[in-house]
């Protein structure tokens, strides 16, 4: 697949490809140089839980032992209520 580069030398990735790979605004990518050329990979996340496009949590790795899932959900719910309520 070929992807274009704009006049500012930024790589332009098609929306279909970004969606397929689950890339969101602000995500980081690793660029590696190899004998064949450049390799672009999604950077490894330190978080085991990530918020995906529609606001849902998505499992993204090994959760540490002793996680209080109820507390995580409750804190997120409180943040969303504050954002919606404007307080």
Image (cartoon, grey):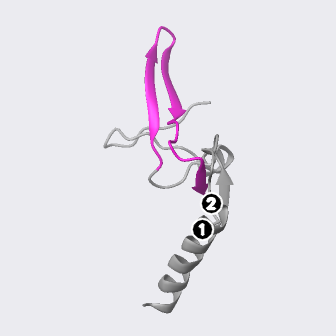
**Label 1 secondary element:** helix
Q: Nearer the viewer, residue 84 or 22?
A: 84
Q: How many marks?
A: 2
Residue 20: x %, y % from top left: 68, 46
Q: Are marks 1 and 2 in contact (CB under 8 Å)?
A: yes
Q: Residue at x 48, y 85 (%)?
A: 82
**Mark 1 → mark 2, Cα distance in angstroms:** 5 Å
Image quadrant for the C terminus?
A: bottom left
Q: Position of residue 50 (x, y in %)?
A: 58, 54
Name the side, left or right, on which 54 lies relative to 31.
right
Report the residue at 50% width, 42% height from top: 46
Q: Is residue 84 above or below residue 20?
A: below
Secondary structure at badge 2 equals loop
- Residue at the disc numbered 2: 68
Answer above or below: position of 69 versus 33. Answer: below
**Mark 1 Cα-neighbour bin, 10 Å: few <14, some 14–19, many ≥20:** few
Residue furthest top as drawn:
35
Quarter holding the N terminus is top right
Expressed as whole percent of the image width and height from the top left, the position of residue 12 reads 48, 44
Residue interval drawn in magenta: 27-52
Q: Quadrant of residue 70?
A: bottom right
Residue occupying the far left of the picture: 8
Q: Residue at x 65, y 66 (%)?
A: 54
Q: Which mark is residue 3?
A: none
Which of the two residues, 80 or 54, is positioned nearer the viewer here?
80
Label 2 Cα neighbours within 10 Å, binned few <14 / some 14-19 / many ≥20: few
Extreme residue in the front direction: 66
In the rendered structure, does residue 51 fall within the stretch colored magenta? yes
Residue marked by disc 1:
71
Give how far across and how far down residue 14 sits, in percent: 58, 46
């Amino acid at each position: 697949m070929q992807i274009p580069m704009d006049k500012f030398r930024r790589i332009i990735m098609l929306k279909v490809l970004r969606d397929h790979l689950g890339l969101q605004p602000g995500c980081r990518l690793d660029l590696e140089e190899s004998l064949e050329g450049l390799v672009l990979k999604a950077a490894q996340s330190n978080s085991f839980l990530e918020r995906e496009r529609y606001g849902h949590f998505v499992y993204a790795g090994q959760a540490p032992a002793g996680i209080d899932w109820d507390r995580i959900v409750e804190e997120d719910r409180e943040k969303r209520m504050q954002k919606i309520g404007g307080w």
